[in-house]
Image (cartoon, grey):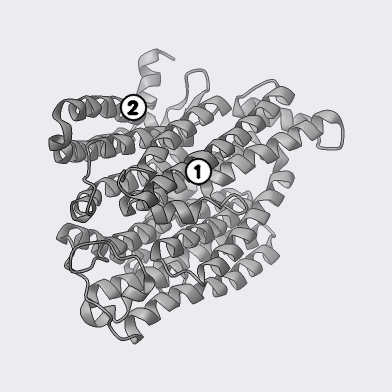
Amino acid sequence: MDYASQLAMTLPEVILAVGSIVLMLVAAWGGPASTKAVSWAAVAVLGGALIALVGPATSGGEAFGGLYRADDFAGFAKVLIFIAAAVAIVMAPDFFARTAGDNLRPEYPVLILLSAAGMGMMVSAADLLTLYVGLELQSLSAYVLASFMRQDARSAEAGLKYFVLGALASGILLYGISLVYGFTGSTMFNEIAGAYAATPLSGDAKSYGLLFGLVFVFAGLAFKMSAVPFHMWTPDVYEGAPTPVTAFFASAPKVASVALGVRVAVEAMGPAEGQWRQIVIFAALASILLGAVAAIGQQNIKRLLAYSSINNVGFALIGLAAGTPEGVASVLNYMAIYIAMTLGSFLVVLQMRDVDGQPVETIASLSGLSRTRPALAAALAIFMFSLAGIPPLFGFYAKFEVFYAAVQAGLFPLAVFGIAFSVIGAYYYLRVIKTMYFDEPVAEFGRGDAFEGGLIAVAAVIVSPLGYLAIPLLSGWTLAAARALF
């Protein structure tokens, strides 16, 4: 295959890389005055990357000697990633304009683009080194984004915590990669799968080495997903980071890490399904339970949504535990609907401002919102009901799909536990709704940005019962994407 054809497969990442470099030069030359132009140009770059997904970028196969794979699975994940990244860029200007002490700088959209390029490499990785390079590009940008508000001590603390714990997780992942390479002799996913198939995990030194490598690799990926027991960074980073950055962390990197975990499990370690399935089932149940229980006492809406993201990762992992094309398709379905619910919720959080325009993050400040801002309260209620998986909202369909895939794969007890734990999680979502509709108003929020209001309306329509109209298209797309891995 010629070099031009291989570059065509990586065109989305090429567009993002070149676009980010050019916009970085524009930002250095134009300074803060170029922020608005750079932001909208970054959205246009993401739009170009989306358009580039049509063609070889989703159907070209392997490129660069098998290091990179362009298939339907990667294409679906990249659509979600690029859309979430674009929303994270457009929701930032109003937030920073109203926040005292810090202004939006043109580096923000550039960092989002670099992070998106890394995530594109992650979901298309067919080699452990490609995986690691993409993951580190995404992570290095994220560390800076978490501490973007230099005048805010919470933001600086969030960035430091994320950096220290992220470095630890990267070390764990790299150690797992070195073990897998040492005992298989390759970093290519297909050759690793062959080594696992040829070496029954029966008790000799090589089998133990492969098993430990598998465990460490999944531990490193679990940190990026914020799955229990590697979730400890999530609440503090989500609370301390600027709200648009938190919305970005809860959406695009979440899709990338889950998609990467699915690809590694199915393509690289598929023959060791009996071993990694135990890890995935534990992480799924622990994430669902802790995400539900720990969120009950939260008073900060961003911390509550952090535990909600941990909880939702647990539900998505149930689909992966099934280990079937239908199970992987259910994971992709779940992440697509999760993106709409999460971005909608954080867009509502951006509207939570006092009369002076300063952010308000306490759940108590939502008291009586149905009487002061009825449309905003209705939108947040839709997102909370949908996150809880209450029919007929679209979030119910996402949970139904992963439970059905688990039952079809013979994991009936896992589905039963997941359903039981989801009832616990419904409590804290309903508490937010109760606060808005049954408590007396304590203060009135200032008027928010009309563009953000339009995005909230779009997200609310997607997760409403109208979303079921998209099921034929979504199901066909996700199943085709899932089958690309098998």
Which element carries disc 2, helix, strand or loop? Answer: helix
Residue 371 percent across, percent down from the top left: 23, 83
Which amino acid is tagged 1?
Answer: Ser
Kindly report which numbered mark, 2 or 1, lies closer to the viewer in this rendering.
1
Q: Which residue lies at the image location 17% right of the left edge and 57% below the top edge? A: 451
Of the 4 image quadrants, the one containing the C terminus is: top right
Residue behind mark 1:
257
* Foreground pick, 430 / 196: 430
- Mark 1, other Cα within 10 Å: few <14 / some 14–19 / many ≥20: many
Image location (x, y in percent) of residue 347 = 29, 60
Whether residue 198 is visible to the viewer of this picture, yes or no, is: yes
Give the image location of residue 291, x and y in percent.
55, 63
Residue 105 or 186: which is nearer the viewer?
A: 105
The residue pinned by badge 2 equals 11
268 or 281: nearer the viewer: 281
What residue sits 53% from the left and 22% below the top? Answer: 66
Residue 383, x across and y down, in percent: 37, 68
Determine which quarter of the picture holds residue 77.
top left
Between disc 2 and disc 1, whose residue precedes? 2
